[in-house]
Image (tube, rainbow, N blue to C red):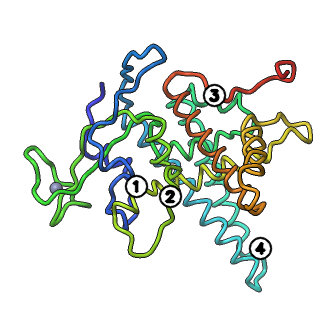
Amino acid sequence: MTSQTPHATHAFLDTQPDDGGVGPSDHHTEQGPDIQDHRGVVVAFPEPDAATWAVLRFLGDTHTDLETTRIAISNRAHRAVIDRDEIEVVLDAITAGEHAAQLKLIRRFRAVAPEIAAWVKDTPGLGEKSVARLLGAIGDPIWAYPMKWVDVAPDGHTCDPDRCGARHLVALQPFQRTPAQLRAYCGWGAPNKRTKGMTQEEALALGNQSAKKIVWNIATGCIKQDGASGKRRSPYRDVYDDGKARYEITHPEWTAGHRHNAAVRLVAKAFIVDLWRIAAGQTSHHPYLKDGDRT
Ligand SMILES: [Zn+2]
């Protein structure tokens, strides 16, 4: 078992200013329920190496920053009345940097989570880049590192100069998430919307917003891979089609857009539960069936 330094633990924090820097949805639970296998035996997963996962997060954030900057410069260059040659060399350099970060990110992803990387490779619709970015945002799918703000520093607390001040940010006992806790952490739990004036408690229940966006992109990417144009059909496309057909019967009053969004939500949830299962050494609920396997 790896000991957690305060610094390494902080690497998994969601640092949005409005949530006080506390990991969403993990803040209120000191200990999650025991996770049992299919025989009802409590499973203890080895705690991951925090430093290794911190590198994945760093690379994911770096790739996102470079991509955002490259898109911004490119858009500005399109709008500006300037000779494109003036900016070409800069754009080439930042594009090369973005590719280098992506390559490093994917390599680190394969090394840190080989079983998830193998599943991604086998499952049509899933891509290494987006799943690597998701893991960069959430850390190990199984393990939660809850944090809490307190007024009085507990014994043995070492202050983080970037965070501690009038109040102290302390690490609670890491715990193993259930699939439902992972869904909530990724922002796909209870269907709430961020509103002005919501309490911190309510904001935290919304989950990690960057993870939520990445999962949305993963889900819509799977849906696009419907088996046409010679590409293998994603098993999550079936989740989408089945869900939409069901909503047509159960919610005839919904618009097509409403049904679409609800079915994307089903895909997102199915994907997150499968991600948890693969991380836990189980098989996914939605395995890819080869053509001959389909009845
Ligand atoms: Zn402190």
User: Dot 1: what SS?
Assistant: loop
Seen as rendered, the residue at the extreme right is 229
Q: Position of residue 6 (x, y in %)?
A: 25, 45
Can you identify the residue that label 1 sits on?
14
Q: CA distance from mark 3 to mark 1?
A: 29 Å
Dot 3 amino acid type = His
Residue 223 as seen in the image, left or right of residue 267: right
Q: Which residue is mark 2?
A: 209
Residue 172 relative to residue 219: left or right: left
Crowding at dot 1, Cα within 10 Å, few <14 / some 14-19 / many 20+, comes out as many
Which residue is nearer to you in this view: 96 or 244? 244
Q: Residue at x 28, y 49 (%)?
A: 147
Report the mark closest to the observer, 3 or 1. 3
Cα distance between the residues tagged 1 and 2: 9 Å
Which numbered marker is on residue 285? 3
Question: Which image quarter is the C terminus in?
Answer: top right
Please provide percent x and percent y for residue 45: 39, 23
SS under mark 2: helix
